[in-house]
């Protein structure tokens, strides 16, 4: 059975995974009246009705539903078998590449500057620090960033644009 955990039979039928068979049957009948090709003359109706019928055939049968739910749970919980794809030559480094200059301050463990310190980022891209202060992930670094940017902690004026040379 090929299952897409993002587009489940429950989503096709627009019911919760914990819904009782009575609810599922009532929703199926409503959807069947809406999308049956004899009643709905749109081009998409036959395809939609086929999806609804397939979903209902599995979800209404207790044995098929149990097997479907088990497979769905297995697909959703693949964390144990997934491996993070990383470049073995530069583990822990973001899209910006290797850090430039001497290390100074806290190390960032996410985003394009993963593996860089705040001091290295300040010398390379101070606008990124400005952005980092404004997002929830940067809250823990706000005092340090404020010091690097030479501001009082209560003032958060944006950086002046870099002039063309």
Image: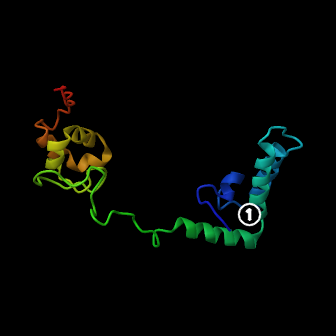
Q: Is residue 140 left or right of residue 32?
A: left
Q: Is residue 148 left or right of residue 64?
A: left
Q: Residues within 10 Å of mark 1 (few under 14, many from 20)?
A: many
Residue 22 shows up from this direction: no
Q: Percent from the top left, x then y, of residue 139?
A: 25, 47
Q: Percent from the top left, x then y, of residue 6?
A: 59, 56
Per the image, the residue denoted by label 1 is 59
Q: Residue at x 33, y 63 (%)?
A: 87
Q: Nearer the viewer, residue 35 or 2?
A: 2
Q: What SS does tag 1 mark?
A: helix
Q: Residue at x 15, y 38 (%)?
A: 153
Q: Quadrant of residue 122?
A: top left
Q: Quadrant of residue 4?
A: bottom right
Q: Residue at x 69, y 53 (%)?
A: 12
Q: Is residue 156 left or right of residue 26?
A: left
Q: Percent from the top left, x then y, of residue 36?
A: 84, 46
Q: Is residue 156 left or right of residue 29?
A: left
């Amino acid at each position: 059975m090929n299952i897409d955990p993002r587009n489940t039979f429950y989503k096709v039928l627009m019911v919760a995974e914990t819904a009782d068979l009575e609810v599922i049957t009532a929703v199926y009948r409503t959807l069947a009246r809406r999308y049956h090709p004899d009643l709905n003359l749109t081009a998409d109706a036959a395809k939609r009705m086929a999806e609804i019928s397939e979903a209902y055939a599995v979800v209404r049968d207790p044995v098929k539903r149990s097997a479907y739910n088990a497979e769905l749970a297995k697909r959703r919980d693949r964390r144990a078998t997934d491996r993070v794809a990383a470049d073995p030559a530069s583990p822990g480094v973001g899209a910006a590449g290797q850090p430039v200059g001497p290390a100074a301050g806290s190390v960032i463990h996410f985003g394009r500057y993963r593996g860089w310190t705040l001091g290295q980022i300040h010398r390379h891209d101070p606008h990124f620090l400005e952005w980092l202060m404004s997002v929830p992930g940067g809250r823990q670094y706000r005092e340090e960033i404020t010091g690097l940017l030479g501001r009082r902690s209560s003032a958060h004026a944006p950086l002046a644009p870099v002039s063309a040379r």
